[in-house]
Amino acid sequence: MTRIQPTQFRNLAARHFLGSADHRISSYVVAVLSVAVAIMAGELVTSLLQAEPIASLMLCAVIFTAWFAGFGPALLAIALALLAFHYYLVPPINSFTWKHSLFVLHVTEVPRLILFSITSFLVACVISSQKKTTEDLRRSGEDLQAAIEDQKRIEAALMASTMYLTEAQRLSRTGSFGWNVASGEIFWSEETFRIFQHDPAAKPTLEVIVQRTHPEDRVAVQKTIEHASIDGKDFDHEYRLLMPDDSVRYVHVVAHAARDASGSTEFFGAVTDVTVAREAEGKLRRSEAYLDEAQRLSHTSSWAWDVRRREFAYRSPGVYHIFGFDPDKGPVSLQAFRDRIHPEDRGRNIEAASRAIREKEVFDVIFRIVLPDGSIKRVRSVGHTVINSDGDVTELIGTHVDVTEQFEAKEKLQRAFEEIQRSEDRIRLVIDTIPTLVWRAGVDGVPDFLNQPALDYTGLTPDQAEAGWPRAFHPDDKKGMLVKWSAIRASGMPGELEARLRRFDGEYRWFLFRGVPLRDESGNIVKWYGSSTDIEDRKRTENALRQSEAYLAQAQRLSLTGTFGWRVATGENTWSAETFRIFGYDEASSATVDMVLARTHPEDRVAVRKAINRASTDQNDYDHAYRLMMPDGSVKHVRAVARATRDASGGIEFVGAVTDVTATKRAEEKLHKAQAELAHVTRVTALGELTASIAHEVNQPLAAVVANAEACLRWLDRATPDLAAARRSAEWVINDATRASEVIRRVRALANKTDVEKVPLDLNDVVRDVMVLVQRELASHRVSVRMELAPLPMILGDRVQLQQVIINLVMNGIEAMQPVTDRPRELAVRSGQDEARHALVSVTDCGIGIAADNANRLFNAFFTTKSSGLGMGLSICRSIVEAHGGRLMVSRNEGPGATFQLALPAHQEDA
Ligand code: ADP
């Protein structure tokens, strides 16, 4: 189809406008020419035909001009025609010469000229109007033609636009509709029918719409329709359709209310199928929720920064969470976000973002967020630029990732690495500084690492170690070492070997090599690690030990002392060779406690068994002496001393010595006998000294006996014998005689007794007995006695021996006070007990005292400061007291004199 463009219209109009001036000039030219032609024609006709056609020719010129040039030129033509008449009518006629009487006209010609003027004027009028009408008619015909063409063009355009609209509706899934409320008439476009899946042939109604609506939305739709029909206002709603195939469609309806000519409401609107959009929205919402959740779980968030508007175009909820805001509590200002960034990081962030925009590159920065509670979060922000078609950066799109945990983990890892580095350095230092040779070897047994001490010791360089290590061994040990090393590797178990290793200076020293395999996860040996310890000293010590063991064995042999170990828990016994010999067993047999019992003398067996049992239960040190009955019937005296120790496992082990004391015992017995005899002699000597006292002691009761016996006789000789008094005297006689015989008995005991007989005793009684015997001695030396006896626990002892001790102490005290003349001679005898329930008896004198030099020697045999002294008294006393399990001590007094004290353990009934 041809279309006239507006520019073409403009050109035509311009041409028409410009051409009108030319046209006008040419019209007047037409007038002049047509009159000129008429004049020439008249000349021609006149000369040829002798007629005068001037008037009609002039009229023709006017008609011609009026038709072709219009009314104006026609008037010019009339004027020119009238001038032409001047040519013909004014003499000289028919000449163009200057006429003498220019306006002299024959009166007869005037009517003709007037008639011509009127006629030609009328003709010009009619002809020009006729011409104009014709022209108008032609033009309106042309206009009509143009209008028809326009109409055709519009119709074609309308058809096309209807087609476009339909196509557009189909493509945009938007149908249109009209609804006249009053008539209830509804108009639907093709697409609307399609959306509702309604037959285009059937008429759409409100019922059809409601029926098609999803049941859940039906009430709302009905309400909207009702409101629209009552209020007549625009409406806009969205609802679902339930299609015949049960699928659901979302439609969005927009309607505009208008009033028609009759004043009733009419709605025009559009219905759009927004199913795709809604489903996409749903999907988007879901994927947004997923994204949100994913971001929340991964501590990630996303954002978009509008570069031109300098504000965030988008922030995901995660951004709020990271910054410690609640996205549900409404918008948060940009400043509030900025304030949460650590002041030291703000500038860096802005700088990084600006650079990213400037250089159009990726932006990646880590910054800190300070939350109101003071805690600090580390966030990694990565962004990239969005560039528009002009090449300008319009947006920065990025993510914030909360990397606090990673950062902390990284820091921890860093620290751990540093620690590992340090500990590696330390281990390296330790490995290189421990005074042990450390090595590592491959599976083939060849070392690939030696620590510094190993290199220093052997003088090998790290490069030489691999090939040169076997040379470092003593030639005599090399073969054995290689064999053992292969055996250890073959066993796959930790192992050790001993060999001599050459020092850099050529000296060989003994080393203990220990190797341990290192296995991978599947249990294959990948390396052998080992240490080599210098055992040269240990080897030397071992040799020395072996030697000293030999000496010891010899010494044991000579001293008749064997050693033994006895583990109570396991019953394990270890005897030295000498022990086997003492018990008369072959050294090859393994020792047992029963072997000891078997050899024990039958009389001692019960005691020994008891002692063994007690030792194993009490776990106390023990020391006992007993006899053995050897297979040949000989008797051996042994003394076993053992100390209880704890072995490594915490069990009790007795370690001890058993000594064959037969010879000693015999010697002791002899000595004992000699001592007893000596003691007896001493006692007898002492008795000799005491004779006066004893005689006095015996004399006194004897004198009393005599006196009382005489008195008794006198009572009986009376005229009437006083029997009661006589009886009383006789009783006194008995008492005195008993007292005398008691003294005699004591003296006899002291003089005779040599056998020891231990019985429970009260030491106070012993003291009192002695004091009776020494009474006279005290008196003759003018010594006063102060007795301070306190109750004592019973002791187990030999009365006579203990009497001998106390007599000795008292006699020494008397003698020590012999030289004293300037002060009263006083002897104090005290008894009492200490915390350990020992019975104590002390004898204190105020005599010459003891010189410091002598204090340690008093108890030695034969030590005396007296010219007639024997020096045996205190020595015998100490033996007696110690044989009673007690102690005899001396101390110097504060004032003059000395104090001797004996302490005896209390007698235990069960002991
Ligand atoms: P003897 O009385 O025969 O000398 P003892 O063994 O009884 O032998 O005494 C040894 C020595 O101890 C005495 O010679 C004496 O020097 C000293 N001695 C003993 N008792 C006392 C005492 N009570 N005061 C001072 N010296 C004493």
Image (cartoon, rainbow, N blue to C red):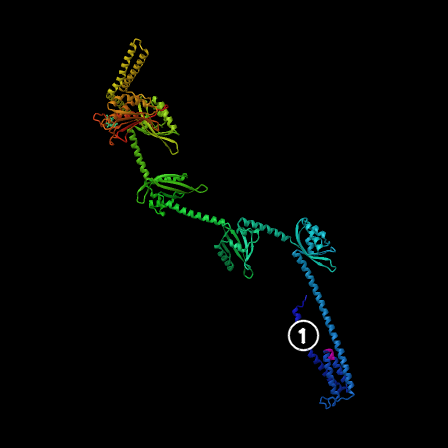
Q: Would residue 884 be found to the left or right of residue 254 on screen?
A: left
Which residue extends farthest bottom? 100
Residue on which the image places disc 1: 17
Q: Which residue type carries mark 1?
A: Phe
Q: Is residue 568 magenta?
A: no
Q: Tell me where residue 273 appears, x and y as whole percent.
A: 66, 54
Tell me the element at label 1: helix
Q: Tell me where residue 663 appears, x and y as whole percent.
A: 28, 25
Q: Tell me where residue 774 appears, x and y as whole percent.
A: 26, 22
Q: Would residue 281 be found to the left or right of residue 866 on screen?
A: right
Quadrant in the picture for residue 434: top left
Quadrant in the picture for residue 169: bottom right
Q: Observer-nearest residue: 148 or 588?
A: 148
* Image quadrant containing the N terminus: bottom right
Total marks shown come to 1
Q: Would residue 3 be found to the left or right of residue 847 on screen?
A: right
Task: Mark yes or no: residue 628 visible.
Answer: no
Q: Does residue 106 lie above or below 196 as drawn?
A: below
Numbered range of the magenta stretch: 64-68
Q: Looking at the image, in which quadrant does ligand 1 appear?
A: top left
Q: Tell me where residue 582 appears, x and y as whole percent.
A: 31, 26
Mark 1 closeness class: few <14, some 14–19, many ≥20 residues within 10 Å: few
Q: Does residue 81 lie above or below 791 as drawn?
A: below
Mark 1: C-beta under 8 Å from nearest atom of ligand 1: no
Which residue extends farthest left? 867
Q: Observer-nearest residue: 777 or 156?
A: 777
Q: Does residue 373 lie above or below 655 as drawn?
A: below
* Image quadrant containing the C terminus: top left
